[in-house]
């Protein structure tokens, strides 16, 4: 709608200019019969995309999904800005998009709070804001058009149900599960939801939640904090990593400390749980049991955002909140489903065949 208005404005301006020239007597003869405005009739859709950073494999795949969907060949002009994990950079990017008068803003916000002012500015400029992946916590939900992403709390609860089922199957006392949580970036929707999922399950099943500390969704920080935690607690037997990159660092730290990762709790191995399941390394680690279970987080959101923009272009109102569907990858073949709030969720038990398919995605 807004774009239609912009095209119309352009057309009217050209018309005005043409008639002004026409009224200037002899000079009117130089006015072309077929005004160049024809070429402007279907201008490219300009999208300002503020990505929060490049901290993980998930993020790289998510960015790639946006860049390949909104290509110039398909009629888009995508302006991509990497926020380098800093909200201030993302706010600057949004202000720049407003100045550039883009048609849409797509925002993947680093954390939830602190967006009211800049989103108000976008709203006043009449630019629709589509939120992708994480959410914003704003006073007025009219400040954004819609959101698409994962239900991070359900992801967390699914991973915890898997652990609960696994402990039961192994006849391993749940009070003897000594867990550390390597959290994601504090204040990010993915961290808040996954942490909540674990805290609730720990209470419900009497798990021993030793400590929660951030690994910032990165391999380096994951390894650093896990190295310290292993020195602090010798009872750790479960590590809940809020993404796969943290899990890679955690596995390195455990192996360097002389302990073993794996599913044999009774045999003294440390069981690792994780989120994402997008990189072949994570999928292979899960196949080998180094990561016992991964709650999938789907990064392929580009085409979903495209559908939203198409709806808006057609004058339709997209769903305010749209969740993507996700599975759970398991190294253990006995768990084929988990239940959360009475809803059954499928579990993909990894084997050589499905791993090959997954790695071709
Ligand atoms: O917000 C999604 C999370 O952010 C992914 O799980 C993680 O890998 C990323 O950095």
Image (tube, rainbow, N blue to C red):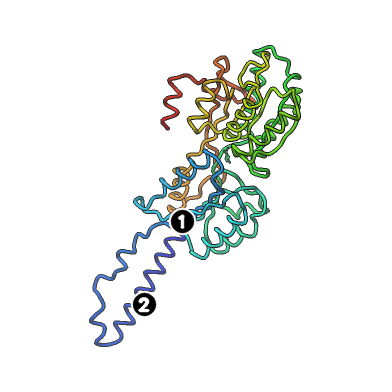
First in sequence: mark 2 vs mark 1: 2
- Answer with the quarter of the image where residue 187 lies: top right
Q: Position of residue 33 (x, y in %)?
A: 24, 73
- Answer with the quarter of the image where residue 256 lies: top right
In front of the other: 217 or 76 = 217
Q: Which residue is mark 1?
A: 79
Q: Quadrant of the C terminus?
A: top left
Q: Which mark is residue 281?
A: none
Whole-number angstrom distance, CA of label 2 to CA of label 1: 31 Å
Q: Please tell me whether residue 45 is drawn above or below residue 241 in the rendered image.
A: below
Q: How many marks?
A: 2
Q: Residues within 10 Å of mark 2 (few under 14, many from 20)?
A: few
In front of the other: 251 or 186 = 251
Q: Position of residue 236 (x, y in %)?
A: 72, 24
Q: Which residue is mark 2?
A: 16
* Rendered residue at 71%/33% (across/down): 228
Q: Quadrant of the N terminus?
A: bottom left
Q: Is residue 330 left or right of residue 188?
A: left
- Dividing the image into four quarters, tell me where ligand 1 lies: top right
Q: Residues within 10 Å of mark 1 (few under 14, many from 20)?
A: some
Q: Position of residue 146 (x, y in %)?
A: 55, 48
Q: Please tell me whether residue 210 is drawn above or below residue 51 in the rendered image.
A: above
* Rendered residue at 34%/74% (across/down): 15
């Amino acid at each position: 709608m807004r774009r239609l208005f912009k095209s119309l404005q352009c057309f009217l301006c050209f018309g005005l200019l043409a008639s002004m020239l026409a009224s200037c007597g002899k000079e009117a003869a130089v006015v072309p019969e077929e005004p160049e405005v024809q070429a402007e009739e279907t201008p490219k859709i300009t999208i300002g995309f503020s990505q929060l950073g490049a901290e993980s494999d998930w993020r790289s795949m998510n960015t790639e999904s946006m860049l390949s969907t909104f290509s110039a060949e398909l009629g888009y002009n995508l302006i991509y800005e990497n926020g380098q994990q800093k909200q201030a950079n993302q706010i600057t990017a949004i202000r720049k998009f407003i100045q550039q008068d883009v048609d849409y803003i797509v925002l993947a916000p680093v954390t939830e709070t602190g967006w009211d002012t800049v989103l108000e500015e976008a709203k006043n400029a009449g630019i629709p804001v589509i939120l992708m992946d994480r959410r914003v916590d704003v006073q007025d939900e009219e400040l954004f058009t819609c959101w698409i992403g994962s239900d991070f709390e359900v992801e967390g609860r699914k991973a915890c149900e898997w652990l609960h089922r696994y402990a039961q199957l192994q006849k391993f006392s749940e009070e003897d599960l000594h867990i550390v949580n390597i959290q994601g970036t504090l204040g990010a929707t993915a961290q808040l939801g996954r942490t909540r999922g674990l805290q609730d399950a720990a209470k419900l099943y009497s798990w021993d939640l030793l400590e929660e500390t951030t690994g910032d969704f990165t391999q380096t920080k994951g390894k650093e904090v896990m190295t310290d935690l292993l020195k602090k607690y010798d009872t750790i037997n479960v590590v809940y990593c809020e993404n796969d990159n943290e899990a890679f660092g955690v596995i390195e730290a455990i192996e360097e400390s002389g302990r073993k990762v794996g599913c044999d709790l009774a045999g003294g191995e440390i069981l690792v749980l994780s989120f994402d399941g997008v990189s072949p390394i994570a999928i292979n680690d899960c196949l080998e049991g180094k990561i016992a279970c991964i709650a999938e987080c789907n990064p392929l959101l580009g085409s979903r955002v495209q559908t939203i923009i198409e709806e808006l272009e057609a004058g339709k109102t997209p769903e305010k909140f749209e969740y993507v569907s996700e599975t759970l990858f398991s190294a253990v073949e006995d768990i084929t489903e988990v239940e959360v709030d009475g809803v059954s969720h499928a579990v993909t038990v990894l084997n050589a065949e499905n791993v090959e398919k997954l790695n071709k995605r």
